[in-house]
Image (tube, coloured by chain):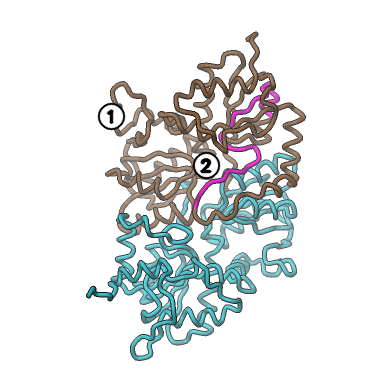
Chain colours: A brown, B cyan
Amino acid sequence: MSEKITARQVLNRIQMTLGASWRNSGTDVFHAGNPETEVTGIVTTFAPTLDVLRRAVAGGKNMIISRESPFWIREAVYSGSGQPANREQVAKNPTYLFKKEYIEQKNLVIWQFHENWGGRKVDGQLRGLAMALGWDRYHKTAAKAGEERYQAGDCFFGPPATSLQALAKSIQDKLKIRGIRVIGNPQTKIGKVALSHGFFLVPDLQRILREPGVDAVVIGEPVEWEASPYFMDVIASGQKKGLIVLGNEVSEEPGSGEVAAWLKTFVSEVPVEWISAGEPFWSPKPA
Amino acid sequence: MADLRLSRRQFALLAGSGLVAGPPVRAQSGALTAGQVVERIQQQVGVPWNPKTYRDTFKIGGPGMPVKGIASTFMSTLDVLQRAAAAGKNMIVTHEPTFWSDADVVKDLGGDPLYQFKLAFGEKNNLIVWRFHDHWHARKPDGIFEGWNKALGWEQYQAAGDQRVWNIPPATLETVAQHVAKVLDTRSVRVIGDPQLKVGKVGRGAHTLTGNMAVLPNVDLLLVSEAREWDSIEYVRDTVLSGEKKGMILISHEAGEEAGMDNCAKWLRSFIPEVPIDFIPTHDAFWRPA
């Protein structure tokens, strides 16, 4: 590891290796630090929380490649989402100022890798989550000859038949999570499961439900006046199905492991490590 | 000449799109109509009616239809419509959308079998769904928070002149989270922060980062019903990681507003004596595996 590489050179190499045409994106930008900084090591993560940044610094790594922005803003479109985030308000916020100072003091460079990572033929976020669940052996659809798995629509799995309650419990245990939420009759029989990740909207759900025989849908984060009541109505219309809501971080974090593994195939100058931001929540036990 | 009479389905679509306006149509033999109910609500709510509201409009059925009974609810889910119909309440006053988007946009739902199913159920049972969101919030006091405050048991702790701040007797974050889960009858509470942190000043947050950022710096505990996980949640997490002694309790959207529609049923009864009025809970649909 004697050769030097800057953050911008890492980005250039990502652009060359992506395998899809590069989109000029509002998300995939340097949010902090000087792109000409010499990189000492790369950390991938879902969210560059202060904890992730501290662990990166402790491990001697100064470039963070994150799915979400360090300063929380993402202009996502859903109904009734209101005005765009107030950037003036954020710029005066004490947590923002604290985090910005830490980043500057430690000479960190933070680059967001979201839209373009999603532009690849293979859905790395889905692959990471399926691997984390141990579902890679349970694909419901046959692999296409000569094609990699986890391309668009390759999201149906057949884990051993069980109930909704037991499936949710097994996912909770496997991923070691605390904030999982479920909709549906716990006794509903589950054979075929659709897996998705991240923010989940009604068109995503409509598309999944056009696939015959889906008993359960596993998702990241719904809007509670959009996809989750749509699912409640699916059940009330007489269909026996279940919805398992993992949380956004839980559903996306394994994808950051995929990003790290992918980077290692073409960045050899510096160490690359995935640091999980961890589930943000805990849940109280009943009083 | 083309037949200009609308089928009930066409009428429901028009009503949902807000194209039907004008004075309420009088039903036969002086029965109370949905339009008259809305007119009375507009007179009673105590704030000027916003003629441009896209939320507080008919979503199924229309103003001319006779009302046999009224059900108020947090959200007009299909399950709520089924229970209302079974209870003989054919007008549903809902706080939240019917067709899964803020403005109940149905133009792309024509081919959606669930949309067809829900609309057909409404038509078959002569249901009227009318949304009451913006003006129930705009009322003074806010009708949602008035009911929610009572449900929480925090009325006596409310800060003077601010329905969204409470000074509760200091307790641990875990204890407060358990209290909230219990009194709001919700199983899906999620928390950020040290469970043993003592909290006293509580602020009600919002669905947005902007709303939550306006409140958190001034309180120990942010209480929020539904917020986006990439912004509000990560902002709160970073605030705690920065060393601030703060916490957040995140409840479902339903748990944050359901009690406000129970409150609405009581309010409606005070000026609509002609028909029975009930609150039908939507319930928190989320549960957690043991």
Which subunit holds the residue at mark 2?
A: A
| A66 and A74: which is toward the camera | A74
Amino acid type of disc 1? Ala
Secondary structure found at label 2: helix
The answer to whether residue A228 is left or right of residue A114 is left
Q: Is residue A276 visible?
A: no
Quick one: label 2 or label 1, which is nearer the N terminus?
1
In magenta segment, residue A248: no
Tell me the magenta residue range.
A54-78
Amino acid type of disc 2? Asn
> Residue at 39% of width from left, 50% of height from top?
A186
What is the CA distance from the residue labelled 2 to the residue labelled 1? 28 Å
| A213 and A134: which is toward the camera | A213
* Residue A155 screen position, x and y as percent: 37, 36
Residue reaching furthest to the left: B1
Numbered tag placed on residue A142 in the rendering: 1
Numbered tag placed on residue A275 in the rendering: none
Q: Residues within 10 Å of mark 2 (few under 14, many from 20)?
A: many
Q: Which residue is mark 2?
A: A248
* Residue B232 screen position, x and y as percent: 62, 48
